[in-house]
Image (tube, grey):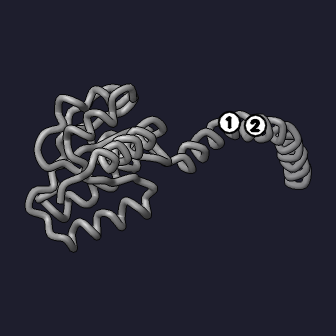
Amino acid sequence: MSLTLEDKKAIVSEVAEVASVAHSAVAAEYRGMTVEEMTSLRNEARSGGVYLRIVKNTLARRAVEGTEFECMKDGLVGPLIIAFSQEDPGGAARVVQKFSKDNKKLVVKLVSLGGKLLEPTDIKAVASLPTKDEAIAQLMSVMKAPVEKLVRTMNEVPSKFVRVVAAVKDQKEAG
């Protein structure tokens, strides 16, 4: 089934719109995967806040023009599925890496983060980036630490006084 010019324009604009707000992108070769496996991958992507799409390479090249994923243009060859992280930078990498562990037919070809093209092996590093909630929790623990230390320090003065008084009392009772 051939795409009309209007269909092609719609696909390019949709992918360009997603790419313009995405945090990172992963392109993987899906040669040999079954429909069931692709459906499973799409379901995982949907639940992980990842936009996943199979797009003709010429249309994908046009869609990423003018976005921070323009660095991927030259690598868009062969049967590729493109995943864009919409919620957190490591989302697409996590979904693709997790799925490719169980399914060796999905092979990572391109990884882009922050306008830079990374090596396909860097997907592990990108996948290990914290989610938004994890990053907020880490930030809050760092911000909370000085306050906790101040409270412990201020509490130490009366505690030390009580220990000294108890030691003096024990000494007088013993002597």
Q: Are marks 1 and 2 in contact (CB under 8 Å)?
A: yes
Looking at the rendered structure, the number of numbered marks drawn on it comes to 2
The amino acid marked with disc number 2 is Val
Residue 140 % position (x, y): 65, 42
In the image: residue 67, left or right of residue 111? right
Q: Residues within 10 Å of mark 2 (few under 14, many from 20)?
A: few
Q: Is residue 175 visible?
A: no
Foreground of the two, 128 or 164 = 128
The amino acid marked with disc number 1 is Met
Per the image, label 2 sits on a secondary structure element best described as helix
In the image: residue 158, left or right of residue 64? right
Residue holding disc 2? 147
The residue shown at (60%, 44%) is 136
The residue shown at (18%, 29%) is 74
Residue holding disc 1? 143
Residue 125 % position (x, y): 31, 40
Q: Is residue 160 visible?
A: yes
Residue 167 % position (x, y): 84, 47
The residue shown at (20%, 57%) is 100
Foreground of the two, 97 or 144 = 97
Foreground of the two, 37 or 118 = 37
Q: Residue furthest left?
A: 32
Q: Residue furthest bottom?
A: 36
The residue shown at (38%, 47%) is 10
Vertically, is 126 above or below 114? below
In the image: residue 43, left or right of residue 73? right
